[in-house]
Image: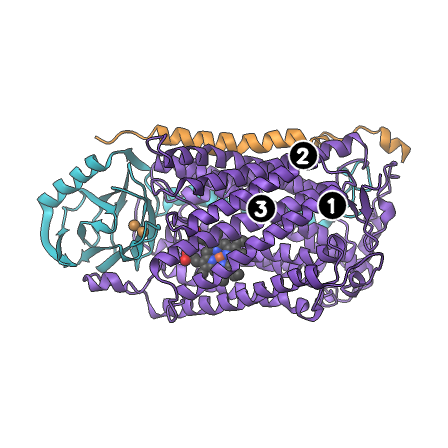
Chain colours: A cyan, B orange, C purple
Amino acid sequence: MSAILPPSELIWWKTPIGKEEIIWIVLALTWCMIMFAMMPIWHIYGKQNLSNEAYKTTPVQYEAKVTAMVEQHTIRTQSVGGVNVPVVAPPAGSDVYMLGRLWSWYPMLEFKKGESYRLHLSSLDWQHGFSLQPININLQVVPEYEMVITITPDTSGEFTIVCNEYCGILHHTMLGKIYVTE
Amino acid sequence: MSEEKEERVPAMQRLLDNHFLLLFIGVTMPTVFYILWGVMEIVSIPIAK
Amino acid sequence: MSKYRICPDTGLYFDRSGEGLMKANAVAGAVALLVGGILALLVGLTRWPAIHYLGASDFYMVLTAHGINALIFWLIFFEIAILYFASSTLLRCRLATPRWAWAGFALMLIGAVMTNVAIFQGNSSVMMTSYAPMEAAPHFYLGMILFAVGALIGCFVFLGTLVIAKEEKTYHGSIPLVTFGALTACIIAVFTIASGAIILIPSFLWSVGLIGQIDALMYRVIWWGMGHSSQQLNVAAQVSVWYAVAAIVFGAKPMSEKVSRTAFLLYIFFLQLASAHHILADPGVSSTWKIFNTSYAMYLAVLASMIHGLTVPGSMEVAQRKKGFTNGLFEWLRKAPWGNPVFSGIFLSIITFGFLGGITGVVMGTEQINLIIHNTFYVPGHFHATVVLGTTLTFMALTYFLIPVLFRREIIMPGLAKWQPYLFAGGMTILAIFMMGAGTLGVPRRHWDVGFAQAAEMGLKFEFPGSAEMMLGLVGIGSVIAVIGGALYLVITVGSLLFGKKLEESAGLMQSFGFATLAPSCYTSEKIEPVKGPAADLEEHGSAGFEAPGTFILAMLLLVTFVVYYFINWKYLSSVWPMG
Ligand code: HEM
Ligand SMILES: [Cu+2]
Ligand SMILES: [Cu+2]
């Protein structure tokens, strides 16, 4: 009789289904399959995907890699609150390491437009959110895990990394920089 | 009406009326596909050199 | 056997002990909503750049408490009440083990208070997600665990009641569709709570020093098994209430038991997989896992939601057409009881949940599209359209039915009650849309200062476009309107409980809101005579062979919106830096 009463027929499975329901189910199911197909298709033809490359690491080990890169490829420094933060310009195609920690992204990077870089991301303490602005690419940065993506900046200028995972009391001060030159 | 009672209840309807089987399926599906598979993926992440 | 009463207005059955439990859970939920709502105002005013009300540490503390009280305590208390209603009342059965049910309620209450105490002591501003390795005070986790155990007891009481009803043959054939929906919610709840136990118990042990560390990625995956599934539990509960209200207000029958129940079955199978929505931007989990899980195994649970989206309003349309509102496509809707908050709340919820919450949820749950949305303000924008416009508004609407029927009080200020759903839905719609808008521009969630004043002092400058600030202002305005709407709800409901005229034998208010009276004779412990379905005579009321042509048009509108918005987002994604 009604949705709050037991069905009036003992066998309701065989009751015929209305026309609009059938049409709607067919349409909706088709749409669902299209949406499902879009994800693998984008992996093949699309340009924005995650590589799935990742490693288990430790803060000490990861920091060492960052330091090694900084020592080799720093081109200048930029003062942030009285501290000189290195700006690093690694060669195109190379492995680039950036870390998140309370409450900064380190180091700053300088890329060449149109070149690809293997960008590694990890955290030394809590979780952070890598949010590249104003491009708007957002990645989760998890301690003890090292994520690798190959990134190809195709616009030049100054870009900011906002932390968009809550990481404690100074979360809203956590910014980093990526510069892209022509 | 009386013959409808004698008619066998279709299998799908019996499934839908079997609440504890549904409970079992509803807990097993996500446990296997989401939790167990997910945890396996995490533990098989290679160690950084 | 006078352990129950039959509601004289509706013929609904209330087991005495079940009734007390329903009341207690619903009231506890309302208290949590009150707390969550006050905190919502503080949060909303702080994220409004022109006001920026709270300081940073208060903001993070208040935001933690807002999320937990509104999302977890309010909704789950209320859902336990719904489970008891859907089992004991709808099956005309005594509630199983009322003592255990009270024990569960007590645990939930103690847990809720304990977690709140932990948060307001100030050392647990970890957000509701409490992502390891960020640590909260031990009683933060302990409170959550007690709450979950209490809720689990509630689920078992529900299941036990189903068993008793079957054994004592209080119904004949299959359980009502609404009870089946509640069963779906209960099943999802069991998985939710199990995941919660797997992750919160170790977290508690870790916070007291018994475990060395918690793996952050493992924590995320398992925590979201709880965190997201509990949202799916909300969806199942809310859709059940939609069906119930269609039956209560219009006397509507489901268009097809088979279709609606199969849709719930798809929920049981697949809905919970979508916990993967939160892991899409995470390292190390493969795309295969992400695609399979985030799409609920090929979007079959989305299919189910789209089906409910058609069949709930469709059943209302069929019922209205039978009453003679057959002109054109939409007379049935124009002549619907828009002044009855039970109906208007539900209908607003169906529309906003579908167009705002549902579509955006699927879009941002797409593996790659998530890259431009993850952790931005878009995310809370989306879920205020689901858990607030969807679930909360639905539960509010249901309350206007429960006050006279369950609590036997007349609703005070019916004139204001008419407007409450519109006010709340209006404010919340503004809030949700502009949160999503700001998120599209990259504005982060859970963020005290998107002007970055402190960073600028240190020499790091960044500004979002001016339009982002404007949208945040509109979020603030939406917040204020929604909070007024929410406050009105609490004033009316609590006021009615305290000061509303007691309804004893009298009918009255039910009719004044325009409820169809239900025939009490529908329930008997004797066998119900199998009635032939009325399907055959329905077609005359529709047009072109459609029983519900108006609803079908609305559904097509949803589909077109969905397709357009989906591809707009792919377009946007294709414009960001290539990566792989
Ligand atoms: C009454 C009006 C409400 C207003 C004005 C409001 C406003 C807000 C705002 C501005 C945020 C902040 C987002 C951020 O900074 O990231 C937020 C977060 C949130 N709200 Fe609401 N909200 C309301 C009601 C609700 C309700 C009823 C629920 C649940 C059913 C809810 C659940 C949440 C959750 C879960 C969060 C996220 C907390 C977190 O990020 O940990 N809200 N709300
Ligand atoms: Cu951070
Ligand atoms: Cu942060």
Q: Is residue C355 above or below residue C109?
A: below
Amino acid tagged 2: Leu
Residue C59 placement (x, y as % from top left):
39, 58
For marks 2 and 3, give the CA distance.
17 Å
At a point 52% along the width and 56% down the height, the residue shown is: C35
Amino acid tagged 3: Ile
Q: Is residue C328 above or below residue C195?
A: below
Q: Nearer the viewer, residue C267 or C499?
A: C499
Residue C179 placement (x, y as % from top left):
71, 42
The N terminus of chain C, quarter of image:
top right
Question: Which mark, residue C159?
Answer: 2
> So how many labels did they put on this image?
3
For marks 1 and 2, give the CA distance.
25 Å
Q: Is residue C458 above or below residue A123?
A: below
Residue B30 placement (x, y as % from top left):
52, 34
Q: Is residue A40 above or below residue C504?
A: above
Reading the image, the residue beneath label 3 is: C76
Q: Chain of mark 3?
A: C
Q: Chain of mark 1?
A: C
Amino acid tagged 1: Ser
